Amino acid sequence: MNYTDIAKQLFSLVGPADNILSATHCMTRLRLVLHAKSPEQIEALKKVEGVLGVYDAGEELQIIFGPGRVDRVTEAFLKELEEARASASPASPSSAGGPTAGKVGLSDGAQSVGPSTATALSESSDRPEIGDGKALHAKIRAKNATPVKLLFKRIASIFIPLIPAFIACGLISGTLNVVSKVDPGFAQTAVYQLLAIGGSTVFWGMNLFVGYNAAKEFGGTPILGGILGALLAHPALASVELTDGPLVPGRGGVISVLLVAALAAALEKQLRRIIPEMFSLFLTPLFTFLISGTVAICVLQPLGGFLSDCIGTAATSAIGSGGAVTGFILGGTFLPMVMLGIHQTLTPIHAELLARYGVTILLPVLAMAGAGQVGASFAVYCKTKNHFLKKTIASALPVGIMGVGEPLIYGVTLPLGKPFIGACIGGACGGAVQAQFMVGAATLGISGLPLAAATDQIPVYLLGLITAYIGGFIATWLIGFDDPPEEK
């Protein structure tokens, strides 16, 4: 796969350079903010080699490539964009839905699975068609655009840039955990100790990263949020005594940092309005830091500590005492949570559990929902007579196994209806296994098969994964579904 050619094709469709306001990427998607875009342009993007789907998220156009591939495509695309801006090249004739932009028909589904797939959803149709992800996802997204859910999404977006760090450190910690069990003597070596330090690095810097991202997300100066996060974790706090005893560095974890970053951003906006412009450069950051820092130490850190204790106790107690029953409920309801948009609330909880215990016991349970989808989709593949549906599933299953479930959920199980229920049942079965043995993961942001390497009980995690596959398959096979007729 030639990533430079892919980048050139993308640029020819979304360019010229002046049309591209920003280009970033997450774990699976190239995210573009454009001045203008068109349906024809989006349809043409779906036909580019390697594209798993295209999702129009309003102000942002998201082109889905999957883990790993998106990094290389983005790198090539940014280089193409930089060269175009440097040379001030004119717009490509195919941009904005030009001559090369075409409609993707039903037969093109192999490259167009995912949140935005080949088959267009008719505006007059109440039932989404198989393979159609964009229209279905857009409807769900519109229903979930409530102020509270948008706040949850904003908070979750603070942690998204940290996911690569969690993955890197989590995989190191998980690998060391396995190696030390096979060879206990390795734990005494300098190599092990250095790697162990590397595996825990993200936790030492988490307050700074969260503070920086949170301040940026809430409209403040990012570095002020960063130093406020550092203040709350400063080891010298332990030498300071207030009325109720010495301060506790890091108390409240990321919860305290989120609170103080939000306060600082709001305060900074007000200060910029009242402080004369000639003094703003000096006084605004000073007063923002002093006032927010004081409130943080005296009020927000104790409050954050209380909330953090509640979150940690609730999560561990629920799974510890409820065991398989709790896991069954959580694993079975996670997909509906995604549909309702409330799954965003779990991201800071995962981060807090990681900071508190070094692992999150929620992630392995919830990851089983995606495994249930794999099993359910494979059952559909085995039973359906629809060739386009088979092609859609065959294209989406590999990425589903690797933990990217959007192509399956929005392109297969949810449009068909009953397989979505089968997927929930499979997730519930796998979640019961994970919760019964309290499997922990030293990372967030990944699921499916890759998550196994970051768990503290790899064989048990794999057992739960297989259970979810089988459970989703059997449930969907027994429940059945209405096999869609072939398009003519």
Image (cartoon, rainbow, N blue to C red):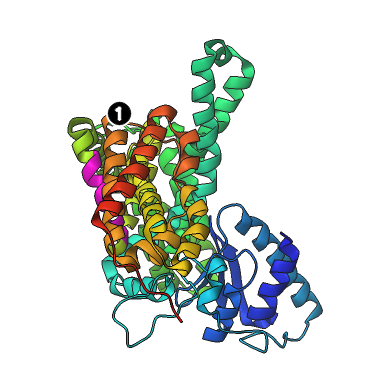
Boundaries of the magenta span = 327-338
**Residue 329 part of the magenta-drawn span:** yes
For disc 1, the neighbor class at 10 Å (few under 14, some 14 to 19, many from 20) is: some
Left or right relative to 420: residue 100: right
Quarter holding residue 271: bottom left
Task: Identify the residue under disc 1.
Answer: 437
Is residue 56 covered in magenta? Answer: no
Question: Which residue lies at the image location 49% right of the left edge and 46% below the top edge?
Answer: 208
Q: Nearer the viewer, residue 415 or 143?
A: 415
Q: Quadrant of the N terminus?
A: bottom right
Q: Quadrant of residue 102?
A: bottom right
Q: Kindly report the secondary structure that dominates the magenta region of the rendered protein.
A: helix
- Vertical relation: 27 (above or below) 196: below
Q: Residue at x 40, y 51 (%)?
A: 374
Three-letter residue code for mark 1: Phe
Instruction: Tell me residue 441's x, y (percent).
Output: 41, 36
Viewer-nearest residue: 117 or 95:
117
